[in-house]
Amino acid sequence: MLGQKMVFDSGNELAALAAKQINYHIMGYYPITPSTQVAEQLDLMGAEGLHDVKLIPAEGEHSAAGICYGGSAAGGRVFNATSANGLLYAIEQLPVQSGTRFPMVLNVACRTVSGPLSIKGDHSDIMYALNCGWIILFAKVPQEVYDFNIIALKIAENLRLPVIIAYDGFFTSHQKRKALVFENDSDVLDFIGEYKPEVTVFDFENPVTIGSYMNEPDLTNNKYQLHIAMEKAKKLIPSVFEEYCNISGRRYHICKGYMTNDADVIMFILGSAFDTAKDAVDNLRQKGFKVGAATVSVLRPWAVDEIYDVIKNAKAVVVCDRQDSFGAGGGNLSIEIKALLKDFNSHADVITRVYGIGGCDFYVEDAEKILNDGIAKIKSEEVMKFDYINKYVGSGEKDLRYFAPLTKEMTSPENVKSGVDENGKITVSGGSIKESLSMPRRIAPGHGACPGCGIFINLNLFLKGISGNVVLLFHTGCGMVVTTAYPKTSFKVNYIHNLFQSGAATLSGVLEVYNQKVKRGEIPDEDVTFIMVSGDGGLDIGLGSAIGAGLRNHGMIVLEYDNGGYMNTGYQQSYSTPKGARSSTSHIGKCGKGKVTFHKDNPQIFAAANIPYVATAAETHPADFIKKAKKAQEYAKKEGMAYIKCLSACPLNWGDEPRFEKDVIAKAVDCCYHPLYEIEKGITTINYDPEKKNSKIDVVEWFAMMGRTRHLKNAEFKGVVDEIQGEIDRRWERLKVRNECDKL
């Protein structure tokens, strides 16, 4: 055995530690709960100079998977972590990775697949990956997450296949436990061995084509070769487990049984719940019942012989699925156990119980009840072959409204008037704060946002300028999560949610069906305004969808509340985070200088799509904000897409006090980090010029107000601050030129 030390870490932290010891070339990633901590921890260690892994933050999981594929095709050691819909978004890339036979390691902190949205743990994501050609190891406890991350790379490089390490989200991923880790990184690397890729895009003496177009019979041969590699894995994995035991003292098996040799009833269960199952077995054994439990450490390849050897003596196998293959009479685990027993002509009864959906706790009492169902079955008692535990059936009540619906008359104040000037630009009169106070709020005060959150200040100001009926679509994010915890809602108007990457496309479908139904006389024309609300990085991963909607020029409004990070997952850097800012994936340390790129200029990106109206707004200029909202509504109804960006305070992650947020936003405007302007039909107009008001300040004065950027005051960051100031000045000067020249 090699030298080891005891640590007290979570599964995510141990995955990052293993990656640090391996010193991968790159990690392409996108933050998603509950796997995000892997990238955060690796970035923290990188900021201290503890590894050389290049972390590349993608704008979405699909691109993160592409980054990893490119890195592996270049002969690099490549690493990633994701969860739930992030895995599904990337899944198109998974067969590409395996089909071209490039190794890599992907950690999946298993989580419920949306919808409805839930961030809790179950196995509904990992089961989608069963047919992607990846080896899948399943870790029950944090120690196994660490060990399997080391074992996985050795297997991957020997077989030229990618490997997933799956583990339960918020159980194994977040629960801290004692674990043994190798003291010396060199011991880890010696065990894995040197990687000598057979093919890379850097062999200029023997250039290769990777990912050819392929027809029959070559494609059949390709898939057959993948099958052969999986068959080899069945033999290789036990030998690697044994090698690892020799250096660590920890022996792993493909399938593990607990009191199964003489068991009449065996519970087959995956992941962290296996320990709960063992406790239930102990309790029932004390009562004289011959029961046992079994699990697997390797989900792919499916080791039929090893699994059967553990469960072969059972008269009944109770399979616990933490997901359901709807309509199949069980989840994937049940289906495969049934097929396995059929292959061996076993007469054992199989009972399926779906448990733990959406992270629902699984107690020893639950496990005992399930085992008792198996005991009843072998006694020929009436037992349901398939069922959910801890389920309930709704009452069927359809009216769960908490508020009386807002009428069009209630939301159409007469004081706000719009018109068109001689140049075809929309004009707005009225809209002062005093005049707009009479309009009822479309979003109720009751929500779960943090104190000082700027989202609802901005939303309510914006909606003061929108008259009549609206349909709101919210991207996933803080604004969505804190307002719609079932069965309650903060919305007094029609609302729909979809994930970050598809919001604008979804709203496009909504509004075009509305237009068609009105056109066909199927519904009356209610003069509806369609609004998509995005923030928390939603216009990073969702930018392609939003630009697509803009290029099609759908008549909607896109409102971006820019809080400068992926706040709903714990403040990871986004493309809108200020350069130099500290976040959970852009740490400050002897080798870390915060975010390394400039903040994204979304208003100019949308303007480049030639949509009719683009504007920026701020809560510090409420009358300007309300008028821009009204303009956006008129443009959306008459000419096409309108986009408004507002800066939204997040005191929790910005590191400032909620009572000073208005001053913080004002400084952002005065330093021109967030200038106030609008672009109507290509014509730029600056709405507030801090130079003319003698209020313009340097950006460092704004940075000094927030904990995330306060370090930039220090002399060691002067070069970074100068670069940021130079970029802000460049953007401001360009705006001023456009303000003058666009009118010519």
Image: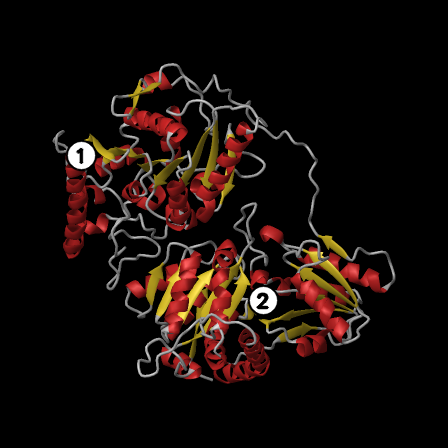
In front of the other: 82 or 96: 96
Report the residue that reaches farthest toward the top. Answer: 414
Distance of mark 2 from mark 1, alpha carbons?
56 Å
Going by the image, does 320 lie left or right of 461?
right
Q: Closer to the observer: label 2 or label 1? A: 1
Of 614 and 687, nearer the camera is: 614
Figure check: 149 above or below 195: above
Question: For residue 585, which quarter of the picture?
Answer: bottom left
Earlier in the chain: of badge 2 and badge 1, it is 2
In the rendered view, would you say 427 is above or below 331? above
Q: Which mark is residue 307?
A: none
Q: Give the answer, above or below, for where 431 lies relative to 616.
A: above
In the structure shown, which secondary structural element does the residue marked by tag 1 occupy?
helix
Residue hosting label 1: 739
At x 53%, y 78%, the residue is 250
Q: Where is residue 83? Give x, y as percent.
A: 50, 58
Q: Is residue 31 above or below residue 305?
A: above
Q: Specify whether residue 655 is in view.
A: no
The residue labelled by disc 2 is 131
Amino acid type for the residue under numbered disc 1? Asn
Closer to the camera in the image, 408 or 648 = 408
Q: Residue at x 27, y 45 (%)?
A: 601
User: Residue lying furthest right in this view?
Assistant: 380
Identified by mark 2, the residue type is Asn
**Residue 724 spot, x, y in % from top left:** 19, 49
Q: Callout 2: 10 Å neighbours few (<14), some, many (20+)?
A: few
